[in-house]
Image (cartoon, rainbow, N blue to C red):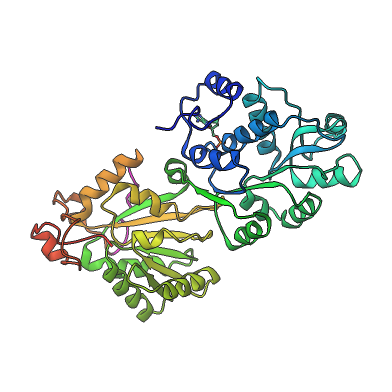
Amino acid sequence: MTSFADLKLAEPLLRALHEEGYTEPTPIQVGAIPHLLHGRDLLGLAQTGTGKTAAFALPILQRLSSHRHPAKPKGARVLVLAPTRELASQIDASFVTYGRHMRLSHAVVFGGVGQGRQVDALRRGVDVLVAAPGRLLDLIGQGHIDLSSVEVLVLDEADRMLDMGFVRDIRRVVSMLPRERQTLLFSATMPKSIAELASGLLRDPARVEVTPPSTTVERVRQAVMFVEESDKKAATLMLLKSPKVQRAIVFTLMKHEANKVSEFLCKSGIVAEAIHGNKSQGARERAMAGFRSGQVKVLVATDIAARGIDVDDVSHVFNYDLPNVPESYVHRIGRTARAGRDGWAVSLCDSEQRAWLRDIEREIGQNIPVFADHPHHSEGARQSTKRPPVLGGGGGQRGGRNQGRGGRPGARRAA
Ligand code: AMP
C-alpha cells in the first residue's frame, strides 16, 4: 500500500498529516500527488469526500516551500477558485492545517461579507489565495488584487461553478494569469462544457478519476420491483412512460438482451439505443451523442459499455437485470443524481436474482424500498429462495436463462 512518505512529501507535511490522524493517502491523492509534484497539469474527476483538497493542497504546499520567494504586493502565488464561500473557507482551512509547520501566508475572498479584512489580508501579497469568482473580480476591478504572477491555478468543483453561471467570470480571471503556470481542474462530472473548459486551460494534463460509492448511493432514490422475467419488458416500458423520466439508462447483463430491449422499446415508440462491447466505436459514439443531445431518450447498456457514459442529467437508472456483482450496482446507480441533481434507480428483480438483491443490500448497508403497487408485481419473485444462475467463464454467447436455471455452470455470462 502506498504511504504518504512513498509519495515523497516533505517532512513538515508528513508531520501535519500524522497529527491529523491520516494514516494513508486516498486514491485521488495516490493518483494526483506524483503528477502534481512533477509540475504537470491535472484533470481530476472526483467529488467532495474523496480527499481531493489534500490531493492538490499537499503538492502545492511542497512547491511553495521548496521554491520560497515572497508574493508580489496584492499578488498570489497560488489561486484556487471555488464556487461557494463554504467551500472556499474549507479549502483555505485545509491549506492552513496541512501547512501548519511551514511558513504560509494565505487569504480567502468571497462575497456576502464586508471586503475590508479581505483587502487587508491581500495587501502584502499571499502564497495562497482561495476565492469565489464574483468577489475576486470585484476586488480586481477595484485594484486590490493583481494576478499577474500566479504560478498555480486550481479550479475546484468546476462543474458546480459552470452550473452556477461562472463560466465567463472564470474565463476573465484566466485571461489575467500568466500563460506559464500549472493548472488543475477538479470536477465531479465531465459534461461537454467541462471538457471544453479543460481543453482550453490545461496543457497535456494527467487525468485522475475516482468515484466514491457511498456518497453516490446516499443521493439516489432507490426502489426495487419484484417482476417475473417474462414481464420485465412490459414493466420497463411502463416505467419509461412516466413523464418524470427525462433521460434514462437501462442496464442488462447480456449484450444481446440489451439489443432485444432496445428494439422492443423502439417498436413501442420510445427512442432507445443499445450500447455494448459488440458495437463499433462509431456506433457507440453516435448513440452517446444522441443521448447527450436528448434525441435518444434511453440508452440500454451492459456494465462494461456503461463505464464511458458521462452524461450529467440522467434522471433514471433502471436495472432490467440486477447485476451479479454488488459493486456494479453502486456504479450503475451512480450514473444518476449527479452534479447536485435528483435521481432515481429502480431495479427489476426476478426469482433468480433474489439472492443478488440480498448481496447488493448488504453491500450498500440498507434495504432498498419495495414498490409493489403495480400490475406486474410477482409475490413469487419476492419470496423466492432460488439460487441464482452461475455466471462467469462459460462459452461466450448467452446460454440463456433457462439453461442457467438448469444449473449449468457458466451458462450466462455478463457482457
Ligand atoms: P475532501 O474530499 O477534500 O472534501 O476531503 C474529505 C475529508 O477527508 C476531509 O475531512 C479531509 O480532512 C479528510 N481526508 C482527506 N484525506 C484524508 C486521508 N488521507 N485520510 C483520512 N482523511 C482524509
Q: Farthest right residue?
A: 142
In the image, residue 351 sits, relative to residue 88, either above or below, namely below
Q: Nearer the viewer, residue 213 or 364?
A: 213
Write the start and end of the magenta stretch as one range. 367-375
Q: Which quadrant would residue 218 be assigned to in this image?
A: top left
Tell me the chief SS of the magenta region. Answer: loop
**Residue depicted at 46% across the width and 46% down the height:** 211
Q: Nearer the viewer, residue 307 or 322?
A: 307
| Residue 48 makes an appearance in the image | no
**Residue depicted at 69% across the width and 32% down the height:** 92
Q: Nearer the viewer, residue 186 or 369?
A: 186
Residue 229 at what x, y percent from top left?
22, 64
**Residue depicted at 50% across the width and 52% down the height:** 337
Q: Is residue 280 left or right of residue 401?
A: right
Residue 68 at what x, y percent from top left?
74, 29
Q: Is residue 147 left or right of residue 230?
A: right
Question: In which quadrant of the rendered image does the N terminus lie?
Answer: top left
- Count of labels in the image: 0
In the image, residue 295 sits, relative to residue 3, either above or below, namely below
Question: In which quadrant of the rendered image does the C terminus lie?
Answer: bottom left
Q: Is residue 94 left or right of residue 314?
A: right
Q: Is residue 127 left or right of residue 289?
A: right
| Residue 30 makes an appearance in the image | yes
Residue 128 at what x, y percent from top left?
73, 34
**Residue depicted at 52% across the width and 37% down the height:** 29
Residue 278 at what x, y percent from top left?
32, 71
Residue 111 on the magenta span:
no
In the image, residue 265 sits, relative to residue 352, either above or below, namely below
Q: Nearer the viewer, residue 386 or 303?
A: 303
